[in-house]
Amino acid sequence: MVLQRFVYKFGTSSVVCAIIRRYSAYPIKPKKPKAEGDTKKFFVDFKKVRVIGGKGGDGCISFRREAKVEFGGPDGGNGGHGGHVIFTGTQNESSLSSVQTVLKASSGIIGKSSNRHGKDAEHLYTEVPLGTIIRDQNGNELTSLDGEREYYIAACGGAGGKGNQHFVSSEDTTPRYAEEGAYGEDRTLYLELKTMAHIGLIGFPNAGKSTLLRAISCARPKVAPYAFTTLHPHVGIVEYDDYERVIVADIPGLIPDAHKNRGLGVSFLRHIERCLCLLYVIDLSIEEPWTQLEHLKYELEQYKPGLSERPHAIIGNKMDLEISRKNYIEMKSRTNLKIIPISAENRQNLKQLLVEMRDMYDIESVTTEYG
Ligand SMILES: Nc1nc2c(ncn2[C@@H]2O[C@H](COP(=O)(O)OP(=O)(O)OP(=O)(O)O)[C@@H](O)[C@H]2O)c(=O)[nH]1
Ligand SMILES: [Mg+2]
């Protein structure tokens, strides 16, 4: 009787489920583990985007129809204007990764009878980091968004069409036509960051750049004992006691002839161009590590003359290994440049490195726009 009333109230299936749930010894369905997608957001300093302004709303063809008004005139309202696509500069963003590749603003609303005009569409605002350069398809610089809330209208929305009421004239008092809303602009643009980081870590694959970035910041690039572990630049922030934040980029490994598109190609040399200062990370445990420094400088010079002469310092990594200590002494005798010996894995001597980094940053932030 009780069961009957229960079935009546909740339906048969819920009762069956309840009974199974009560008496089965095992869970009905084992819980599936969540998919482990690659949710990491990579640093993006260059993006091709298509921007499409919203279409204007069509004008309306309508005539006033009311009781006792036999020949009410035309009363079709105008369509609303389509929305613009607008880029605004903000310091809350540091990468172009959140900018979508196709940005389409919404369309205006069509006009209606009784001279009701359609509503204009909302503009589509997209935030980009400060220092974003916007180029057209031919590579010409259109603008550079350097200040907070500076904006650039990338694609204008189409104008709304006029309703038939707009076309009334002495010659044609009952126009049976209206204007269609115009299509919005459709353009392809290139967004590019002027500055990617204050300090870039440059080195051969396996030199320990990612290990170092993990040690000094909260960034978590993958570390592994094989070449080209890092395929995209990663950016970490080093915060000092006075709350000054220095942005450090781990750039994928370079190899000889990288300027001829060997290895991971020229694109990574482009990333280096957007770093204010450079830290050459040298693996001191390999044979003749000083040749690495020459190769790195040569590649940068081949890509862009003068690039290797940006304010820089040399980091001798893997000092925890016996062979590195010998190489360090030899390397010091071969170059007049200062070498900061560290062990990124064991976090040794990172304090000295952080002090050197801060000095570089302080000098550069005074001389450049983007401190
Ligand atoms: N012994 C020792 N090993 C280190 C040190 N730093 C990094 N390694 C090891 O070197 C290997 C490469 O380190 P990564 O940080 O992935 O090197 P990377 O320069 O980022 O390499 P790519 O991403 O391929 O360019 C890993 O196995 C690290 O554990 C160190 O200070 N001492
Ligand atoms: Mg790496």
Image: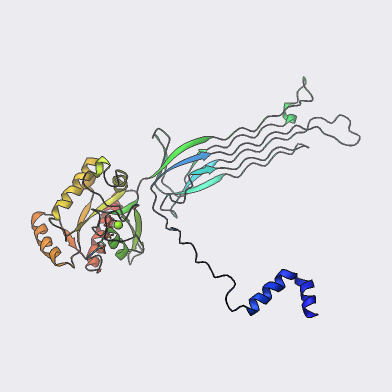
Let me know if residue 306 appears in the view. no
Q: Position of residue 93 (x, y in %)?
A: 44, 53
Q: Residue at x 19, y 47 (%)?
A: 297
Q: Residue at x 50, y 64 (%)?
A: 34
Image quadrant assignment for residue 267: top left
Image quadrant assignment for residue 258: top left
Task: Specify the farthest residue to the right.
Answer: 68
> How many tags in the picture?
0
Task: Specify the farthest residue to the top.
Answer: 171
Give the camera-side residue of 270 and 16.
Answer: 16
Q: Position of residue 281 (x, y in %)?
A: 22, 56
Q: Residue at x 29, y 53 (%)?
A: 228
Does residue 316 appear left or right of residue 34 in this picture? left
Q: How is the image coloured?
A: rainbow
Image: 167 above or below 114: above
Give the camera-side residue of 4 and 280.
Answer: 4
Q: Residue at x 71, y 37 (%)?
A: 111
Does residue 66 appear left or right of residue 230 in this picture? right
Q: Position of residue 248 (x, y in %)?
A: 32, 57
Let me know if residue 214 appears in the view. yes
Quadrant including the N terminus: bottom right
Give the camera-side residue of 346 and 143.
Answer: 346
Does residue 13 appear left or right of residue 341 in this picture? right
Ligand 2 shows up in the quarter that is: bottom left
Q: Position of residue 182 (x, y in %)?
A: 61, 32
